């Protein structure tokens, strides 16, 4: 990215504070990305892009001013600083000089092959190999879509507290979706991988294996029975249900939503809010995982934050704004979609810690219920934790044995209640698929994970007569 000299940053921060602000910050970003999409045998998209610029934030009392620019010259940055300062509370005046102290960053992941050094033709070839493998997996496969994506995001953060730091974040993603057709109509299967690594991702994963797995899921559902309806025990497989705890529980532990009264966990630190089996963690330091980084978008090092320990709520997640207001240290959860956005409290990699039971024993101990191997998309009321998620891959459990595959079913419940109703936790923890968390119109990469677990009772919304 374009180098912004330290003395320039110092003067820009000083200009930002001239309006009387108490805190000023410069966030600069240079992001390059490539995406390629194959749909129905044809390359539908092959694009590369670069976006760079800076945002200046000024906090004065309860007011935050923010301005962004793609002009990284001193004049452009000063203009943004003056605009942000004007938007914040006015007062004071005179000149300000901010002394900066450059801080080293230890990134959890290393990159062996920069994706930008790999030819586009090589990336397109991955899509074609996946398409061929999926179509060859079964005669029922009708449609295949595959997506490749990579990004390199270099950021710089300087603030009026003297912080000067930066990070280089590389992510690579591949996904396959398959549609199979049969007597039950059209059924879909998906498989995706994504890590904060470079093109060496494909030394770890074969795209043909991913394609065949997606095809198998679609074809299996052709022979599935409609999901039952009603309340029953639900076993969620390792790595398959982390999105439930991210959406229905994790958001309620973000300090900004807590402060707004939009969380059932408000004023409950120190209280038992979950089964004693439950330890819920948000950890931006998990090497290579989709939500990891060296620093967050406010310059705070990534951290491992235990939110719930043995069922007791221990803390919330914090950013600069909420931390300053409440007198709490930052937890490495200040994130933003780009330099054009204000940071806010966001999750990183959120997961339930391992239990001690053999997953086979958890299933064997379930007389009648549903086994969910993979949860899909859904909707959540973050204020209450009420949720509905689709079951992308699910099976019936009968007499302690996983039997028939199910289709057309939803999982309905309440996140905080699920935490309380977890009655068995396996020792087979796994992270799930990479995701993008949306909040207030901003998307950021996040990861989630769970071991195999059993919830005492959840509502299955099925279509079986």
Image: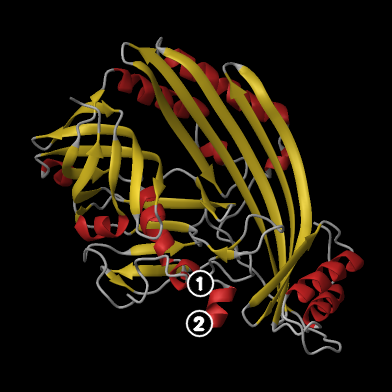
Quarter-wise, where is residue 151 in the image? top right
Answer above or below: position of 345 versus 376. below
Quarter-wise, where is residue 419 in the image? bottom left
Q: Residue at x 30, y 37 (%)?
A: 410
Badges 2 and 1: C-beta atoms under 8 Å apart?
A: yes
Q: Residue at x 58, y 59 (%)?
A: 293
> Could you tell me if residue 225 is visible in this image?
yes
Secondary element under disc 2, as helix, strand or loop, is: helix
Q: Please name the residue that numbered disc 2 is placed on.
A: 326
Q: Nearer the viewer, residue 124 or 277?
A: 277
Q: Please name the residue that numbered disc 1 is placed on.
A: 318
Answer above or below: position of 91 versus 330. below
| Side (left or right) of 74 relative to 88 | right
Q: Residue at x 12, y 43 (%)?
A: 366
Mark pair 2, 1: CA separation: 10 Å
| Side (left or right) of 219 relative to 147 | left
| Side (left or right) of 170 relative to 234 | right
**Residue 381 place in picture, x, y as percent:** 39, 53
Q: Nearer the viewer, residue 444 or 291?
A: 444
Quadrant the C terminus occupies: top left
Sequence-wise first label, 2 or 1: 1
> In the current view of this chain or complex, which residue is farthest to the right?
75
Q: Residues within 10 Å of mark 1 (few under 14, many from 20)?
A: many
**Residue 296 place in picture, x, y as percent:** 60, 65
Q: Residues within 10 Å of mark 2 (few under 14, many from 20)?
A: few
Quadrant the N terminus occupies: bottom right
Secondary element under disc 1, as helix, strand or loop, is: loop
């Amino acid at each position: 990215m374009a180098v912004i000299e330290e003395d320039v940053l110092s003067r820009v921060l000083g200009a930002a504070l001239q309006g009387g602000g108490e805190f000023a910050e410069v966030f600069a970003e240079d992001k390059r990305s490539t995406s390629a999409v194959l749909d129905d045998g044809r390359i539908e998209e092959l694009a590369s892009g670069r976006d760079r610029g800076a945002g200046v934030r000024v906090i004065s009392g309860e007011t935050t001013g923010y301005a962004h620019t793609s002009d990284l010259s001193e004049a452009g940055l000063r203009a943004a600083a003056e605009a942000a300062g004007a938007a914040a509370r006015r007062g004071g005046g005179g000149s300000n000089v901010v002394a900066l102290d450059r801080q080293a960053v230890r990134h959890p992941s290393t990159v062996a092959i920069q994706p930008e050094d790999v030819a586009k033709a090589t990336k397109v070839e991955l899509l074609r190999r996946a398409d061929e493998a999926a179509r060859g997996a079964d005669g029922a496969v009708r449609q295949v879509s595959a997506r490749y994506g990579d990004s390199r995001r270099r950021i710089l953060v300087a603030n009026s507290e003297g912080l000067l730091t930066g990070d280089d974040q590389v992510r690579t993603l591949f996904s396959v979706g398959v549609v199979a057709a049969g007597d039950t109509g059209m059924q879909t299967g998906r498989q995706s991988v994504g890590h904060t690594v470079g093109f060496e991702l494909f030394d770890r994963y074969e795209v043909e294996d991913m394609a065949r797995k997606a095809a198998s899921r679609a074809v299996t559902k052709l022979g599935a029975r409609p999901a039952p309806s009603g309340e029953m025990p639900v076993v969620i497989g390792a790595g398959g249900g982390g999105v439930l705890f991210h959406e229905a529980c994790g958001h309620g532990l973000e300090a900004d939503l807590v402060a707004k009264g939009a969380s059932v966990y408000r004023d409950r630190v120190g209280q038992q809010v979950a089964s004693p089996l439950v330890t819920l963690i948000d950890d931006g330091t998990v090497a290579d995982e989709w939500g990891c980084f060296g620093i967050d978008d406010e310059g705070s090092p990534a951290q491992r934050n235990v939110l719930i320990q043995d069922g007791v709520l221990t803390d919330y997640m914090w950013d600069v704004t909420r931390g300053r207001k409440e007198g709490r240290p930052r937890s490495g959860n200040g994130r933003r979609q780009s330099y054009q956005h204000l940071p806010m409290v966001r999750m990183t990699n959120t997961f339930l810690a391992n239990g001690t039971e053999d997953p086979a024993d958890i299933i064997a101990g379930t007389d009648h219920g549903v086994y969910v191997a993979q949860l899909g998309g859904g909707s959540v009321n973050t204020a209450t934790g009420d949720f509905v998620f689709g079951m992308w891959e699910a099976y019936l459990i009968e007499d302690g044995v996983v039997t028939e595959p199910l289709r057309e079913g939803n999982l309905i419940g309440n996140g905080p209640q699920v935490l309380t109703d977890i009655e068995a936790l396996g020792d087979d923890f796994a992270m799930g698929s990479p995701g993008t968390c949306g909040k207030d119109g901003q998307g950021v990469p996040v990861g989630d994970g769970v071991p195999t677990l059993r919830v005492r009772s959840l509502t299955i919304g099925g279509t079986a007569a």
